[in-house]
Amino acid sequence: MRYPIFVALIAFFPIWVLAARAAENSDNVLTYHADAARSGHYVMPGLTWTKAADMRPDEAFDGHVPGNVYAQPLYWRPAGAAHGLVVVATEDNVVVALDAITGKRVWQRSLGKPIPLNEQPCGNIDPLGITGTPVIDEHTGSIYFDAFFDQGKGARHFVFGLSLADGAVLPGWPVDEVEALAALGMTIDPAVQYQRGALTIVGDKLYVPYSGHFGGCGDYHGLVVGLRMDKPGIFAAWRTSGPSGGVWAPGGIAYDGHDLYIATGGALGETEWGGSEAVIRLPPDLNWRQTSQAFFAPSDWSESGDLGGVNPLPLDLPEGGKGSTLVMALGAGREYLLDRSDLGGIGHPLATLRQNGGGPIGSPATYRVGGDLLVAFRVNNKICPGALHTAGVAAVRVTGGQNPAMTQQWCAGLDGEGAPIVTTSDGEADPIVWIVGAEGDNQLHGFRGDDGKELFVSDEIPSSVANLRHFMTILAAAGRLYFAGDGRVLAFSFTH
């Protein structure tokens, strides 16, 4: 993907077209789910529905890394290099660059001792270091991420920039979030603020989302921090006016070429809406004004569940005109279509689709089948027809125009909590929805994008990988599928 092309042209081309063209133009995967819009769509020439059955683990791929992994790996191939790098961040506060073919370590950088669970006020990650997926700036060949550790003043969040050439810390980094926010007149309790969502780059600006720990302890807020990369430091920040409302979805912040989109989590005892349980459109300067055009919350926002479990997904439909520039929000048992220019305020979506049982979680992926735009996502506590599991992967068809709508296309059973991606062989043909049964069957699954028929299922992961963590997301690059477990990155390839 060539990120500058994406930013410059997105105003003139549909998001799904840009995602496909970006994947064709370069193997580089600079951010979570392939692009800043979080499409989750990768082009892999030769990977057809028939060839999916040939997918096999690369037993010779080394892939060893220190620590547990929640972040999606990224891919970087410098100009002229024979092999690219698979770059992964771990909860040990370590960033490792692996040779994408051999899996051997090229460089490794340790940033600070992570915080064990018994020293956290609440949570479910032990230890806690780097959780959110980093982001790469291809202009400078740098990678940015948030690391959590104690540098002598208590556990704090530090935003780092490293050179992808050798892992060296860039001049001016890291930025201490507590001190930098205090300079803006904003006070946070770093012990209860949690960094889970993927980071985003827009031009020379870096955006980092924050929420609370699992269990929701302490005085935390949904928070987005904006930093300059050329002169390291915070230029602005936005946070919920009420307590809680964390920005915790693994996809973090989506960007449509004009604005940033976030989803905030559930309210904790709020009687008046203060930013929680909502989709919020933020301008790049983070100077947000509360108008009905700039946010959406369900009419039952105080009790509707957790809309923050899935990042918003910008969608540009081919119909053009009114009802074609949308954003999809996914909550507990419901999906919403919203007009990106007017999100509707409280209780006014363009369309709503209800799911049986629990709703989507993780991150969605979008692709086309014929003239239809489809969105695939993992659903929780939903029994798909004929399936033996109480969870699954579902796909809905989205239509725009005067009356935007969603209809379920298919649903397939799955035991696990991964986040799906989609591959196509040329940008549209042979769509395959790939997902790992993380913390479940621990197998790699591939489903046909048009009808949900299972094309591939792997054996269980090797015993050398202790665990696959929930929301684990696959990287598609260099003709392979990569995903990380505790202590190791795995690679799957197919016969071309």
Image (cartoon, helix red, strand yellow):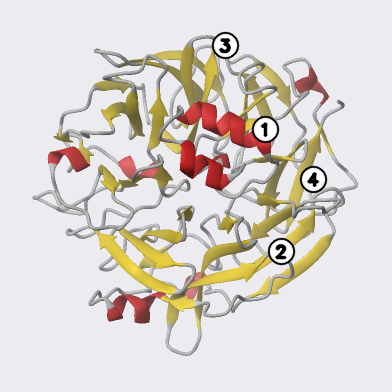
Q: Which residue is mark 2?
A: 96
Distance Cα–Cα, label 1 vs label 4: 32 Å
Q: Amino acid at mark 1?
A: Glu
Q: Which residue is mark 4?
A: 462
Q: Which residue is mark 3?
A: 451
Q: Amino acid at mark 4?
A: Pro
- x then y, percent, for residue 138: 61, 55
- Could you tell which of marks 1 and 4 lies nearer the N-terminus? 1
Q: Amino acid at mark 3?
A: Asp
Q: Which of label 4 and label 3 is nearer to you?
A: 3
Determine whether, in the image, residue 363 is placed left or right of residue 166: left
Please identify the quarter of the rendering in which residue 418 is found.
Answer: top right
Instruction: Name the disc covering residue 36, or none.
Output: none
Helix, strand or loop for disc 3: loop
Q: Which residue is mark 1?
A: 24
Helix, strand or loop for disc 4: loop
Residue 369, placed above or below residue 262 = above
Residue 419, placed above or below residue 50 = below
